[in-house]
Amino acid sequence: MTRVAAVDCGTNSIRLLVADADPATGEIVELDRRMQIVRLGQGVDRTGRLAPDALERTFAACREYAAVIKELGAERVRFVATSASRDAENSEVFVAGVLDILGVEPEVISGDQEAELSFTGATKELVGGDHFAKPYLVVDIGGGSAEFVLGDDEVRAARSVDIGCVRMTERHLVDDGAVVDPPTPGRIAAIRADIDAALDLAEETVPLGGAATLVGLAGTVTTVAAIALGLPEYDSAAIHHSRIPFERVEEITGRLLASTHEERAAIPAMHPGRVDVITAGALVLLAVMKRTGAREVVVSEHDILDGIAWSAASGH
C-alpha cells in the first residue's frame, strides 16, 4: 500500500483525500477526507481573472490541508486544479501560492483529463460488480464545468462542457451581485438554453443515450440525493450508491426553482456554500436525465478525488 494525498481544487470547492491505496488489488483505505467551499471561480466567467479574496480563501484551505498531509505522512501528493484555474488569466498567482504552501505544483488539467479521472474514481469499485449494468455514463457536475464520460472497464469517450453550477448561476441568476430569488421564467429559460446547447456539444463526442447506468458525481448530485432521501443531515454512507428516480429529481428541481435563499438554507442536508448554486446545478442534472432518457441516477460519493488518489498511487 502507498500512502497518498489527493487534492481536487475546483471552481466551487477544494477537497482533500489522504488514503492508503494499492492499484494492484484495487484496495483503498481512506484516512482523511474533507472539503471546503472556497469559491475560487468567483467572477471568473465575467472578469477572466481569479479574485484576490477567492485566492486567499483557497490558500487558507491549502494551509490546513498541508498540516493534515504532514501529520498523516503521505508519501506522494498530487494536486489537480480544474475549470476556474484553467480559465483564468492570472493562474500563475494561484500556481505559485499552492507550490509555496504544499510543495507541489498544481496540475491545471484539461477537461478530458478531468473526465477520465472522474470516471476512474467513480467506477473502479463498480467494475466487476453485477448490480450496476455497463456501460456507465459518468456525469460530474462541477462549479465551472460538467464532464461526461462513457465507458465500461475503460473510457470510451469523454467531453467537458462549461455548464457548471457556479458558472450558470453567475451568468443567469445574479443581478447587481445578488442572486435573484426565486428566478424569473426568462432567467430559467436562458439557463436551459445554455444547458441544451452544451449538451449538443457533449453529444458530438459522447453518445449520451448509449449507457445502461447513469452515475452522477459531485455536490449538486449528492445534495439532490440527500434531499430526495429526506436525510436529517448530510450522510455520505446513505447517499453513496443511492438510486434517485427521474421523477424525484424533477420534483426537487421544481421546489428549488420556487424557493428563496432562506428556504434553501433551511434544508437540513444543504451545505451553506451550495445554497445559491444548487438551483442551477439541479437544472443541469434534470436536463442530463431528460437528454439521456435515464429513469434514475446512481449517486457516487467517489469521484475525481478518488481518481487522483489512484493516479498518485500508480506513480503518476
Image: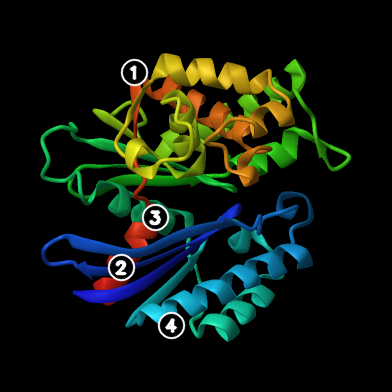
User: Which residue, given by chain and number where applicable, does mark 3 sit on?
Assistant: 304
Give the residue at x 20% y 49%. 125
Is 119 on the left or on the right of 36, as rendered?
left
Q: Which of marks 3 and 4 is in front?
A: 4
For label 2, count other residues whose C-alpha is less than 10 Å away and answer few (under 14), some (14-19) or many (20+): many
State yes or no: discs 1 and 3 in contact (Cβ < 8 Å).
no
In 3D space, how far apart are the residues under numbered discs 3 and 4 (Cα atoms)? 22 Å
Q: Which amino acid, by three-letter code, is at mark 1?
A: Arg
Q: Nearer the viewer, mark 2 or mark 1?
A: 2
Which comes sooner in the sequence, label 2 or label 4?
Answer: 2
The residue closer to the viewer here, 244 or 229, is: 229
Which comes sooner in the sequence, label 2 or label 1?
Answer: 2
Which comes sooner in the sequence, label 1 or label 3?
Answer: 1
Image coords of residue 32 (percent x, y): 38, 65
In 3D space, how far apart are the residues under numbered discs 2 and 4 (Cα atoms)? 13 Å
Decide if residue 10 is in sight here.
Answer: no
Asked where in the image residue 51 lies, by quadrant, the reply is bottom right
User: Which residue, given by chain and number where applicable, does mark 2 sit on?
Assistant: 19
In 3D space, how far apart are the residues under numbered discs 1 and 4 (Cα atoms)? 45 Å
User: Which residue, given by chain and number where applicable, does mark 1 sit on?
Assistant: 295
- Pick out the residue farthest to the right: 176
Q: Which amino acid, by three-letter code, is at mark 2?
A: Ala
